[in-house]
Image (cartoon, rainbow, N blue to C red):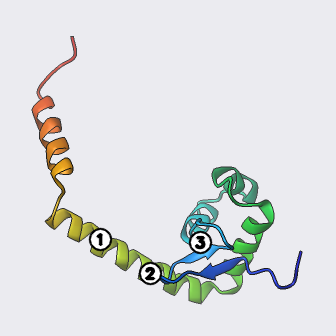
Amino acid sequence: MDPQTEYVKTDQHGVMRVGDTHVMLDSVVAAFDQGHSPETIRSQYPSLTLEQVYGAITYYLSHRDQVEQYLRRQEGEWAKWRAQSERQPSAVVDRLRGMKAAGAGKTLP
C-alpha cells in the first residue's frame, strides 16, 4: 500500500467518493453499517478493490464525526431533490402513474 493513497476523495460537487472511482462513500458506509463484510461490499461494487473497501471503512471509522456530518448533509440534499421531483413530476412519471392507476383494477387472465 502506497502511503500517499487516498481512499476517500471529495469531488467538485462535495460528494465523498472511494478513491478515483464513482462509488460514493455513502454506499460503502451503508453496507458496512448493515453488517456486510468488506468482501461482500467488494462484490457489490466491482469497480472497487478490496484494499479500497477496507481503506474507505478505515477512513469512516477514523473520521466518524466528519462522515456522519457529511451523510446528514447528503440526506438533506436527497430530500430536496425528492421534494422537487414530487412538485414537478416529468411527463414520463405522470404517464407511468396513469398506467399504474388504470391497471390497478385489472386482473390477469
- The x, y position of residue 17, in whole percent, is 60, 74
Q: Secondary structure at mark 2?
A: helix
Q: Are marks 3 and 1 in contact (CB under 8 Å)?
A: no
Given residues 63 and 92, the one toward you in this image is 92
Which quarter of the picture shows residue 1? bottom right
- The x, y position of residue 11, in whole percent, is 55, 81
Q: Amino acid at mark 2?
A: Arg
Q: Are marks 3 and 2 in contact (CB under 8 Å)?
A: no
106 left or right, relative to 18 = left
Numbered disc in front, either 3 or 2: 3
Residue at horizontal 56 percent and vertical 69 percent from the top: 24
- The x, y position of residue 81, in whole percent, is 29, 71
88 left or right, relative to 73 = left
C-alpha distance separating marks 3 and 1: 19 Å
Q: Tell me, for residue 81, which label it has, or none.
A: 1
- The x, y position of residue 9, in whole percent, is 64, 81
C-alpha distance separating marks 3 and 2: 13 Å
Residue at numbered disc 3: 25
Given residues 51 and 29, the one toward you in this image is 51
Q: Amino acid at mark 1?
A: Trp
**Residue that extends furthest to the top in the rendered view of this protein:** 109
C-alpha distance separating marks 1 and 2: 14 Å
Q: Is residue 83 above or below residue 35?
A: below
Q: Is residue 15 above or below residue 28?
A: below
The quadrant of the rendering that contains the C terminus is top left
Q: Tell me, for residue 72, which label it has, or none.
A: 2
